[in-house]
Amino acid sequence: MYPEDLRYSKEHEWVRQEGNRVRVGITYYAQHELGDVVFVDLPQEGSIFQAGEAFAVVESVKAVSDIYAPVSGRVVEVNRELADRPELINQDPYGAGWIAVLEMENPAELEDLLDAEAYRALVEG
């Protein structure tokens, strides 16, 4: 449910490091709590965000939730498929349901994120 190769934020985003870039999405826990996702407001490619800053919005049948940048960086790619298929976040949160790729400003910020064990303790605690 929480892949070991990812890092996690306390705000329920996941990060997969790909060199100096990170692929970002929301966790299984987050999508489960939100319910059926019906719309995703993606960030603009080229936009720059600081860690902890809202960079996307996910709307579900239950709520509208900000998605926060887990690390500082520039958006280099967004998952355009979510415009037509927002339910991918529910169906495959760690795969096809990714939200954006950021080019990191400061890779050391990854150390501030949780590993799978710590994230599991956070949500199951």
Image (tube, helix red, strand yellow):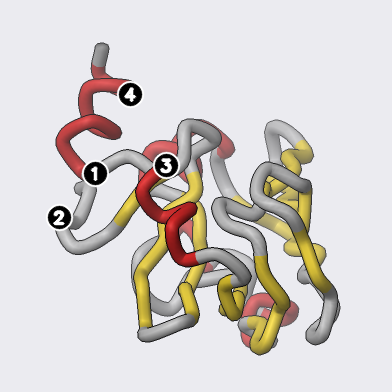
Of the residues shown, which amino acid type is indicated by label 3? Asp
Q: Earlier in the sequence, mark 3 or mark 2?
A: 2
- Residue 68: x and y in percent read 67, 48
Q: Earlier in the sequence, mark 4 or mark 1?
A: 1
Q: CA distance from mark 3 to mark 2?
A: 16 Å
Q: Nearer the viewer, mark 3 or mark 2?
A: 3
Q: Earlier in the sequence, mark 3 or mark 4?
A: 3
Q: Nearer the viewer, mark 1 or mark 3?
A: 3
Disc 2 target residue: 4
Of the residues shown, which amino acid type is indicated by label 4? Val
Q: Judge whether residue 118 can be spotted in this image.
A: yes
Q: Quadrant of residue 106?
A: bottom right
Q: Nearer the viewer, residue 42 or 8?
A: 8
Q: Residues within 10 Å of mark 4 (few under 14, many from 20)?
A: few
Q: Is residue 63 left or right of residue 111?
A: right
Q: Earlier in the sequence, mark 2 or mark 1?
A: 2
- Residue 1: x and y in percent read 20, 48
Disc 3 target residue: 112
Of the residues shown, which amino acid type is indicated by label 2? Glu
Q: Residues within 10 Å of mark 3 (few under 14, many from 20)?
A: few
- Residue 29: x and y in percent read 39, 37
Say which element carries label 1.
Answer: loop
Disc 4 target residue: 123
Say which element carries label 4.
Answer: helix
Q: CA distance from mark 3 to mark 4?
A: 17 Å
Q: Earlier in the sequence, mark 4 or mark 2?
A: 2
Residue at 64% across, 54% down: 69
Q: Residues within 10 Å of mark 2 (few under 14, many from 20)?
A: few
Say which element carries label 3.
Answer: helix
Q: Nearer the viewer, mark 3 or mark 4?
A: 3
Q: CA distance from mark 2 to mark 1?
A: 7 Å
